[in-house]
Amino acid sequence: MSTDPSPSGNPQSQTRTAIINPSSSSSCFTTAAAAVPNTHSRFRMPLRLPSLLALPAPLRHIVLRNPQRTLFWSSPTPEPVETVPPQGPEIYDIVCVGGGPAGLGLLGALRANDLTKDLRIALIEGQNLESGRWKEAQDGVDVQGYANRCSSLTPKSVAFLNSIGAWHHIRRSRTQPYHSMRVWDGVSGSRIVFDSAETSLPNNGGPASFSLISALTSSIFPQRPRSAEPDMDPSVVATMTENQNITSALLSNLDEHPSVDTFDQTRVENIELGEETEDVDMSGWPILTLQYRQRERKLAARLLVGADGANSPVRNFAGIPSRGWDYNRHGVVATLQLSPQSEDEHRTAYQRFLPTGPIALLPLPGPYASLVWSTTPAHAAKLKALQPEDFVAMVNAAFRLTPTDLEYLHTLPSGQTDEVSWRQQHTPALTVSAEDGRPWLAHGTDVVGVQPGSIASFPLKMRHADTYTGHRVALLGDAAHTIHPLAGQGLNQGLGDAQSLAACVAKAVATGGDIGSSWTLDGYNAERWAANNAIMGTVDKLHKLYSAGSGPVVWARSLGLDVVNRLDHVKGYLMRQAAGR
């Protein structure tokens, strides 16, 4: 990546000017005529080289590589124009605001495609992008411990990262595939098992994502078919890794494409539509004003991409409403150490639905796991204030004791360790089935420690933009949608957005279309908004469904879970649909 973009992007652009209307369909012909060299001075028009970027990439290549053969028309000889340095903004095909996984995934996909690899792209990020990379210890030893912000990557997300070259940069030693998942109702004990060995079907069948959510929604909105990746295990339900591992891999992948102009540690001061002048009409283009290295810069975007988080300035500029609500719940995250376990590579994830919210234990390499516990703000504050040994006891209790026991434990100022130990001795262990008596929680799932400094919490909310696109604007990731973490789909949705938008841009370039027009962006909005809305709606309803602690709602949800759990072929079909296999 280029970390210090020149003001104009090309030295020649400082000594030429052009008359061009970027929003007009006739601008292609104006620029083509302007590109004819000096040997045709009678027909030559003055040129500012950045205006050439107004052309679709294929036509731009024809003009640059075959200037002598470029078609032009006869016109009166223009008046001589004095060559002056350009005074307008720097013109880019795509300006992406936000350097998280969604934004970096989009840029990686664009650079990996022959059709879009030559587009002029700028990346703007408020933080230092170098902080997102892995830092080696001085003695060469790998980073110790695990970050508390981890994600469960679906096979489809892994395939996307692999297709753009980013998976090659992932630290495999810090990834943990898991092959089964056990989910159960904390009130009734009803359960469902997703296990590759039990639900795989012929013809490359296999499980899909973190939970039943994406399986159900994918049957309504099927994924695009994709070819099988040779290095992907079809028995993998999902792959756990730290968010920093993903970000670092995407940054390393972009390093192989230095044509991306990077403005990190940069604040976007203002976004407004351009103006029409006697030289150029940019009245329909977003113009960004930046403060970069103590100097003001202005960028004009044929397509402005907002991957800038839930409080997206790009979304506000486009006037796109975002609707939703707060759950009055906080997500408590931590990195846990588990009791010694066998060397069996068949790893399992666990999730239990409690009236206050679900708790999930997701495997990391070695005897470690990532905790995501959704609970009330008061309980979250109490958990963070506990001593490490009492926090560990509360996590073990949340997977084993009744909701009534947990409510009592939350009232204790301290001493949860002894209380939980006593109560566990008098609480029957949950078993896989009454016939064999095998424990539901496998050996090696007892939490024995918590990584210092890893306990944190964040508020949970649901937000969804009314649309993902506007005129020359597209939203992805959290700028477009924020979801409850119970399904583990937030980052996967962002990568799916990036893949879809990159495909729409490539299609526009291939057909000579305008990458910022509604014709181009409508396909992205139609594909992603409906699919994401289905997932978000299902997650929201599940959260409300499992918030009930008694009554007929508990009976109905338990019956449904038990019935689906007995239909292996149905589970296998839904899981294959979610995986895109």
Image: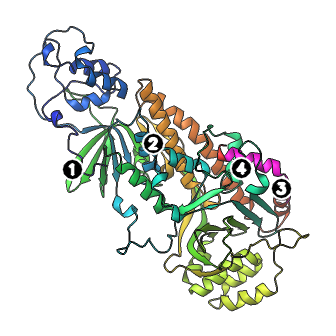
Residue position marked by numbered label 2 in the rendering: 109
N-terminal of the pair, mark 4 or mark 3, is 4
Q: Secondary structure at mark 1?
A: strand
The front one of 380 and 127 is 127
Residue 272 falls inside the magenta stretch: no
Q: Nearer the viewer, residue 139 or 474?
A: 139
Neighbourhood count class around disc 2 (C-alpha, 10 Å): few under 14, some 14–19, many 20 upward: many
Q: CA distance from mark 1 to mark 4?
A: 53 Å
Q: Residue at image x 43%, y 40%?
A: 112
Alpha-carbon distance for marks 2 and 4? 26 Å
Closer to viewer: mark 2 or mark 1 = 2
- Residue type, label 4: Gly
Highlighted range, magenta:
559-578
Judging from the image, what secondary structure is the residue with disc 2 in?
helix
Which residue, given by chain and number where applicable, does mark 1 sit on? 296
Instruction: Provide the secondary structure element on which disc 4 rests.
Output: loop
Count residues near mark 1 (Cα–Cα under 10 Å), then give few for <14, some for 14-19, many for 20+.
few
The image shows residue 497, relative to residue 456, as above or below, that is above
In the image, taking residue 368 as reference, residue 275 lies left or right, namely left
Residue visible at 84% across and 65% down in the picture: 551
> Residue 247: percent from the left, percent from the top?
44, 57
Quickly name the residue at label 4. Answer: 206
Q: Which mark is residue 560?
A: 3
Mark nearer the viewer, 4 or 3:
4
- The type of residue carrying mark 3 is Gly
Q: Is residue 32 left or right of residue 508?
A: left
Q: Are marks 2 and 3 in contact (CB under 8 Å)?
A: no
